[in-house]
Amino acid sequence: MKATILGCGRVGSMIAGLLDQEKFEVTVIDNNFNAFGNLGDNFNGSQVTGNITDEEVLRSAGVETADLVVVLTSDDIANLMAAQMIRQKFNKDTILVRVRDPIKAGAFQEMGLKTICPTNVEFDMILKELKIKPRKGKAGSG
C-alpha cells in the first residue's frame, strides 16, 4: 500500500512513521526541508520538498499512485486546495483532511471530503468529561 502525507509537523511525521512501520510505502511532502527531521532516523520512506498545492510537486511525490492521502498542514485553505486538486486531477477518493476550523470542516464535508477536526474532537472530549450533552452542532457552529 502506498501513502502520501502532506505536512511533516508533529502529527504528519507521527502518521508517516506509523504507516512506515506498518510496511506502507510512504512519501511525505512539506515545504520546509527542516521539517523532515521530525521523521527520525528509522524512517524508510521518501521526502519531497515543495508546495502541497503544486501539481508537479504532487506528481513527483507519486500522489497519482497512492492508495491513501492524508493532508495535515496547519493551513486549512491550503489543505482544502490540495485535497480538491488531488480528488479532481488524480481521481482519488481516499483523502483524509485535517481542518482546524469547525465551520470550515462542515463546509469541507459538504463538498464530500473526509475531515478530522481537532477542535471538534477536543470539544466533544471536554463535554464528555463535564458530563454535558451537546446542545446544538459543534464548537464554533453556533
Image (cartoon, grey):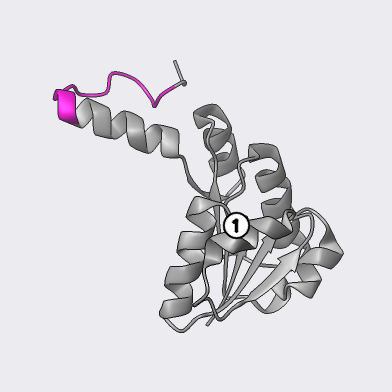
Place of residue 97 in the rendered image (x, y in percent of width and height, measured from the top left): 56, 51
Q: Nearer the viewer, residue 60 or 140?
A: 60
Q: Is residue 92 left or right of residue 117?
A: right
Q: Residue at x 53, y 76 (%)?
A: 43
Q: Residue at x 52, y 74 (%)?
A: 41
Place of residue 139 in the rendered image (x, y in percent of width and height, measured from the top left): 41, 24
Q: Is residue 133 left or right of residue 85?
A: left
Q: Amino acid at mark 1?
A: Cys
Residue extent of the magenta highlight: 129-139
Q: Nearer the viewer, residue 35 or 65?
A: 35
Q: Is residue 6 visible?
A: no
Q: Nearer the viewer, residue 4 or 18?
A: 18
Q: Residue at x 61, y 41 (%)?
A: 74
Provide the residue designation for mark 1: 8
Most common secondary structure along the magenta stretch: loop
Q: Secondary structure at mark 1?
A: loop
